[in-house]
Image (spheres, rainbow, N blue to C red):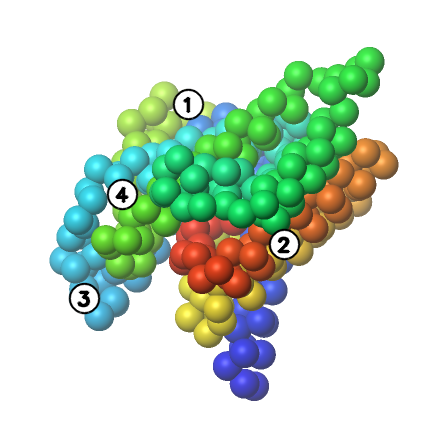
């Protein structure tokens, strides 16, 4: 296989694994506290981050050395909180509804990059952002008589992940990717461990199995994603996350019996199209910084 073919296979495998991970998160999130589930996931994630850091060219000492230490710690903590909210959203709002909202992340990142990164957004991307937000309104359907206020939960998760992505771009100006990945895992694990034990609960033997699978999918998905970014440009890998949106919606419908309304399908299609255009436009302008480490909702 050529490097490009290998990279595409790694990217597709990663988003497929992350889709399965989100399905497992919904299953566990309906029975156990999301903070507790996130803590167990982060313990495995931190171990994986430590392993990769120790095997990096600069070693563990190089990964720990951060020029913007507090920014790196804040990123890790923010992502841990975002994942807790995402799992809550999967179990209470649904996989399909949550991920159609998550699809707007590149649009929110483009908006936040103006005040926080000092980037300029031209009229083409502002138009795409506006169209994308019309798609979001179509998804949440606020004028419908049965509008569910729980839809605010995935919106919060989307805003938080977009902020995390912008912080990742800012940190990449002074710190290496190995450092960013190390603090994403270790800082997040340390933060969630401060509160997670208070939510410790009994888990059945079967669900311990699913928890183990959850941890394995997280580590394997990250490894494949890192490999993909090492073989392909970010502009090729980033739109792959929208395949995850489709796969997760299918899991929600066929495994958990969720219902995809016309508004969700049409709105999701609009948001995905606007997001792909925004990513493509950034790459044309040469501003596409290294992508955030994780697709939304995954550690």
Name the element at disc 1: helix
Residue 46 appears at what percent x and percent y? 32, 48
Name the element at disc 4: helix
Is 234 above or below relative to 25? below
Name the element at disc 3: loop
Q: Cβ–Cβ below 8 Å for labels 3 and 1?
A: no
| Residue at the disc numbered 1 | 199
Q: Quadrant of residue 42?
A: top left
Within 10 Å of disc 4 (Cα), the crowding (few <14, some 14-19, many 20+) is many
Which badge, 2 or 1, comes first in the chain's sequence? 1
Nearest to the observer: residue 166 or residue 60: 166
Name the element at disc 2: helix
For image coordinates 43% across by 57% down, the residue present is 287
Q: Nearer the viewer, mark 3 or mark 4?
A: 4
In space, the residues marked 2 and 4 are separated at their CA atoms by 29 Å
Q: Nearer the viewer, mark 2 or mark 4?
A: 2
For image coordinates 37% across by 37% down, the residue present is 116
- Badge number at residue 58: 3
Within 10 Å of disc 2 (Cα), the crowding (few <14, some 14-19, many 20+) is some
Q: Nearer the viewer, mark 2 or mark 3?
A: 2
- Badge number at residue 72: 4
For the C terminus, the quadrant is top left
């Amino acid at each position: 296989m050529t490097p490009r073919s290998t990279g595409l296979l790694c990217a597709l495998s990663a988003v497929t694994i992350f889709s399965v991970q989100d399905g497992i998160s919904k299953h566990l999130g309906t029975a156990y506290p999301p903070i507790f589930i996130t803590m167990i996931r982060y313990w495995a994630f931190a171990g994986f981050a430590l392993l990769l850091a120790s095997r990096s060219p600069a070693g563990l000492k190089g990964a720990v050395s951060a020029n913007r230490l507090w920014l790196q710690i804040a990123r890790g903590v923010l992502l841990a909180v975002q994942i807790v909210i995402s799992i809550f959203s999967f179990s209470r709002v649904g996989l399909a509804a949550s991920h159609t909202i998550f699809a707007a992340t590149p649009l929110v990142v483009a908006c936040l990059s103006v005040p926080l990164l000092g980037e300029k957004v031209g009229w083409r991307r502002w138009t795409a952002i506006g169209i994308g937000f019309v798609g979001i309104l179509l998804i949440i359907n606020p004028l419908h008589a049965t509008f569910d206020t729980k839809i605010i939960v995935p919106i919060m998760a989307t805003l938080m992940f977009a902020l995390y992505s912008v912080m990742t771009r800012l940190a990449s100006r002074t710190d290496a990717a190995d450092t960013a990945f190390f603090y994403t895992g270790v800082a997040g694990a340390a933060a969630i461990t401060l509160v997670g034990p208070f939510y410790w609960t009994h888990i059945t033997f079967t669900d311990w199995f699913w928890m183990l699978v959850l941890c394995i999918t997280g580590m394997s998905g990250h490894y494949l994603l890192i490999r993909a970014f090492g073989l392909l440009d970010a502009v090729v890998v980033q739109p792959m996350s929208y395949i995850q949106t489709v796969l997760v919606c299918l899991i929600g419908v066929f495994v958990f019996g969720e219902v995809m309304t016309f508004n969700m399908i049409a709105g999701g299609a609009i948001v995905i199209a606007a997001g792909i255009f925004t990513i493509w436009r950034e790459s044309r302008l040469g501003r596409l910084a290294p992508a955030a480490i994780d697709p939304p909702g995954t550690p």
